[in-house]
Image: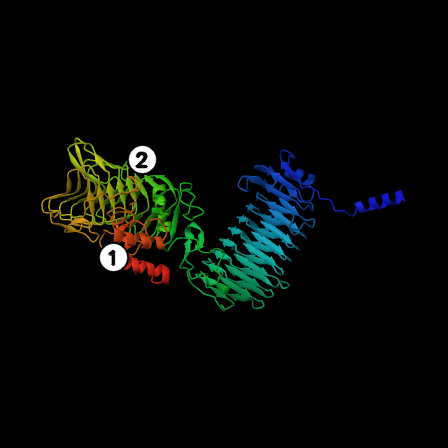
């Protein structure tokens, strides 16, 4: 009985599958040649080949293995050891688990079938190789690749400059059901079928290939589909350009059964027509762009449904960039709404976003999010009208110039509206020159937004932060700091320019003189410059105390800026200085703590005082002189007790966050109507708080405007009743419409 049990157990062991761990055979470390590595490998193994040139012919001998280079085809070459032999051979029934990946296969001569690669009764996968400069002998087939009687997969290869003296310069397939996908097939020559030649094939699919500049003296410059026994082959979504033949420069369908030619771009054939049909069952030819072929677009067949004949508008055909621009007639014009050709949209002819990152590369980047430029200036150089140059957070050490372009150069602030994006996205001139220059006629469509602009250094007549000469860009929501003015000039310098300067913080900049005592300013306007200076904070800018004067805004020489809703505080000399017929419009500003003067010019700065909408003393132009009460001298965020809240121009077309009047300064104070205690909640305690303020002289709401819940401009019991009705009876929500 024991013997019987042991016999049964031993028998069962043969029924249990065993897992064999795949090995890696390193060439030349483990095996001196690739063929030796193949010989020693078993199914499932990888033969991994180091960079170098290997003078040998390799044969997979039926093994299901991966033969792969370590460093790619540019660094790893297999070339002929002797004439007349194919360099890579699959002739022992291999299937798609036999893979050749990552080699240059070159140099075969005088071969009858398959100069670079030969497949006979086999179906390997051949991917990511460069197969170039191989040649067959007289009546030879398939100088690059020859496959007969199999189901091979040929993908992501470059098949280049091969020459067959008979058929199939790049690829020859006979009696195959194959997949030819995502290859570049170019500059191949043959007597027939220079790029791809199918003979008696059934069900082969040729898709998403670039077939370029192949030539033959007979049939099929780009693609030849031939043979009585062939049918159901598909030529789909290829870009076929500048090929030539006597018959069918782009595609030739010759003496064969039904085929499908769909969604291709066939253009610029040198000879033989774009698509040529001879002695064949009528194929399905639809949704192709066949254009500018010599001598005609079609011979022997007429275009059918969905076909067009129009310039495909490649990105740059001279540079062999065959992606489509956004206005190409091929975009979405294929069957089912797909793009025609092998490539989708990829170039840049309509406004869009160009991405910039400190980890990008100006040499290899293309401005996409995955492959950004390294510098903002490179983005500007590549931009077209209407583009946005979007810089991710980081410090960009450069000087940029707009070059007259109507573009937006911005940080992520334009999307997230987070002040941190401004602080963390920095353009730093490194103490040399202007950070931003607009000197080529830029207008309000040229926008710089959302940056910290720092460490510029400029002499008289130029601005170290943003220099505008004969230009009027838009400068908004930036921080300009740590810039140095030499002699006359401003951090933002306007010379015969009228930019829109909105929502910036200009602080901690320095002015000193070199040749004579001079004026420096946060914003400097000369020679008929009339910028709109709105909702900026210009503060704590200073100068050499003995030789230079630093003011918030300086106006000279018939410059008449519109100065509105700004905080101008704690600058060394004055708030606003006007000389030589300058006459600014100064309304709704808080000008406080600047040296000796509010506005240093006779006739400007009305001494008639009243009160503004919030009951705060102001001049007749609603300017106030009050401590703006900000969080600190870096962020300049208003605190709830600031007199600048709701003190801006009530007719300004941009309401504040609470739907009331806009605040003075660069950043709005964010509060909710009815939140009397500034604690982020609106509840019955706010009703009690407001009633206590109105009836018992309790503490005022903070900010004061949060108490006017019915938006009638008054604080009274009606507001407390309104708020109580909201909480207790579901009445209207506090806030202005």
Which residue is nearer to you in this view: 617 or 329? 617
Which residue is nearer to you in this view: 32 or 400? 400
Instruction: Identify the image quadrant of the N terminus.
Output: top right
Which residue is nearer to you in this view: 467 or 551? 551
Q: At x 45% / y 54%, what residue is drawn?
A: 322
Relative image position of residue 246 (x, y in whole percent): 51, 59
Secondary structure found at label 2:
loop
Q: Residue furthest right?
A: 1
Instruction: Identify the image quadrant of the C terminus.
Output: bottom left
Side of 271 where 91 appears, left or right = right
Secondary structure found at label 1:
loop
Q: At x 86% / y 45%, what residue is drawn?
A: 5
Marks 1,2: beta carbons within 8 A: no
Count the marks. Answer: 2
| Disc on res. 334 | none
Numbered disc in front, either 1 or 2: 1
Work out whether residue 662 can be spotted: no
Relative image position of residue 205 (x, y in whole percent): 58, 58
Question: Label 2 belongs to which residue?
Answer: 430
Relative image position of residue 242 (x, y in whole percent): 47, 55
Q: Residue furthest front?
A: 696
Question: Label 1 belongs to which residue?
Answer: 716
Which residue is nearer to you in this view: 628 or 86? 628
Q: Residues within 10 Å of mark 1 (few under 14, many from 20)?
A: some
Side of 621 where 179 appears, left or right = right
Relative image position of residue 292 (x, y in whole percent): 43, 61
Q: Residues within 10 Å of mark 2 (few under 14, many from 20)?
A: some
């Amino acid at each position: 009985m024991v013997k019987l049990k042991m016999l049964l157990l031993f028998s069962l062991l043969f029924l249990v599958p065993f897992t064999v761990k795949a090995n890696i055979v390193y060439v030349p470390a483990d095996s001196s040649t690739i063929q030796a590595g193949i010989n020693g490998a078993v199914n499932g193994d990888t033969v991994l080949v180091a960079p170098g040139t290997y003078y040998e012919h390799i044969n997979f001998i039926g093994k299901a293995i991966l033969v792969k280079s370590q460093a790619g085809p540019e660094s790893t070459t297999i070339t002929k050891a002797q004439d007349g032999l194919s360099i890579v051979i699959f002739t022992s029934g291999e299937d798609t688990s036999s893979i050749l990946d990552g080699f240059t296969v070159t140099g075969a001569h005088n071969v009858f079938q398959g100069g670079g690669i030969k497949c006979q009764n086999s179906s390997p996968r051949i991917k990511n190789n460069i197969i170039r400069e191989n040649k067959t002998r007289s009546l030879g087939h398939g100088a690059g690749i020859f496959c007969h009687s199999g189901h091979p997969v040929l993908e992501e290869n470059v098949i280049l400059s091969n020459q067959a003296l008979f058929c199939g310069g790049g690829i020859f397939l006979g009696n195959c059901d194959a997949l030819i996908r995502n290859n570049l097939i170019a500059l191949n020559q043959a007597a027939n079928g220079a790029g791809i030649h199918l003979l008696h094939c059934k069900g082969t699919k040729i898709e998403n290939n670039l077939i370029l500049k192949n030539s033959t003296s007979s049939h099929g410059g780009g693609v030849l589909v031939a043979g009585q026994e062939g049918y159901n082959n598909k030529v789909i979504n290829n870009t076929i350009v500048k090929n030539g033949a006597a018959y069918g420069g782009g595609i030739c369908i010759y003496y064969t059964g039904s085929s499908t030619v769909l969604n291709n771009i066939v253009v610029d054939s040198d000879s033989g027509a774009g698509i040529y049909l001879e002695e064949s069952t009528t194929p399905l030819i639809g949704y192709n762009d066949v254009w500018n072929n010599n001598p005609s677009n079609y011979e022997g067949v007429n275009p059918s449904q969905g076909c067009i004949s129009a310039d495909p508008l490649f990105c740059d055909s001279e540079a062999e960039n065959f992606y489509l621009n956004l206005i190409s007639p091929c975009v979405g014009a294929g069957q089912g709404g797909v793009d025609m050709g092998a490539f989708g949209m990829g170039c840049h002819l309509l406004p869009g976003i160009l991405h910039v990152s400190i980890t990008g590369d100006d040499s290899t980047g293309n401005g996409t999010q995955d492959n950004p430029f390294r510098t903002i200036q490179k983005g500007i150089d590549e931009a077209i009208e209407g583009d946005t140059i979007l810089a991710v957070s980081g410090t960009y050490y450069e000087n940029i110039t707009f070059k007259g372009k109507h573009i937006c150069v911005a940080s992520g602030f334009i999307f997230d509206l987070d002040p941190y994006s401004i602080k963390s996205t920095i353009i730093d001139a490194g103490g040399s020159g202007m950070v931003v220059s607009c000197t080529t006629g830029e207008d309000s469509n040229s926008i710089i937004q959302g940056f910290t602009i720092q460490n510029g250094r400029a002499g008289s007549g130029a601005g170290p932060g943003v220099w505008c000469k004969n230009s009027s860009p838009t400068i908004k929501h930036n921080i300009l700091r740590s810039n140095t003015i030499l002699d006359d000039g401003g951090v933002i310098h306007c010379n015969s320019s009228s930019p829109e300067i909105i929502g910036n913080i200009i602080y901690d900049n320095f002015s000193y003189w070199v040749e004579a005592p001079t004026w420096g300013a946060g914003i400097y306007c000369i020679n008929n410059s009339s910028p709109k200076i709105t909702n900026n904070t210009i503060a704590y800018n200073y100068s050499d105390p003995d030789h230079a004067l630093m003011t918030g805004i300086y106006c000279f020489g018939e410059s008449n800026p519109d100065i509105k809703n700004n905080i101008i505080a704690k600058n060394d000399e004055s708030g606003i200085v006007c000389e030589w017929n300058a006459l600014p419009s100064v309304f709704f500003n808080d000008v406080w703590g600047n040296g000796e003067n509010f506005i240093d010019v006779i006739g400007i700065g009305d001494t008639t005082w009243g009160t503004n909408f919030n009951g705060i003393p102001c001049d007749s132009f609603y300017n106030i002189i009050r401590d703006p009460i900000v969080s600190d001298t870096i962020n300049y965020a208003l605190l709830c007790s600031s007199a600048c809240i709701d003190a801006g121009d009530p007719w300004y077309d941009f309401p504040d966050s609470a739907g009331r009047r806009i605040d003075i300064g660069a950043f709005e104070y964010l509060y909710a109507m009815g939140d009397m205690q500034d604690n982020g909640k609106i509840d019955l305690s706010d009703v009690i708080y407001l009633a206590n303020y109105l009836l018992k002289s309790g503490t005022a709401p903070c900010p004061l405007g949060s108490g006017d819940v019915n938006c009638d401009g008054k604080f009274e019991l009606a507001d407390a009743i309104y708020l109580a009705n909201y909480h207790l009876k579901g009445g209207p929500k506090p806030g202005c419409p």
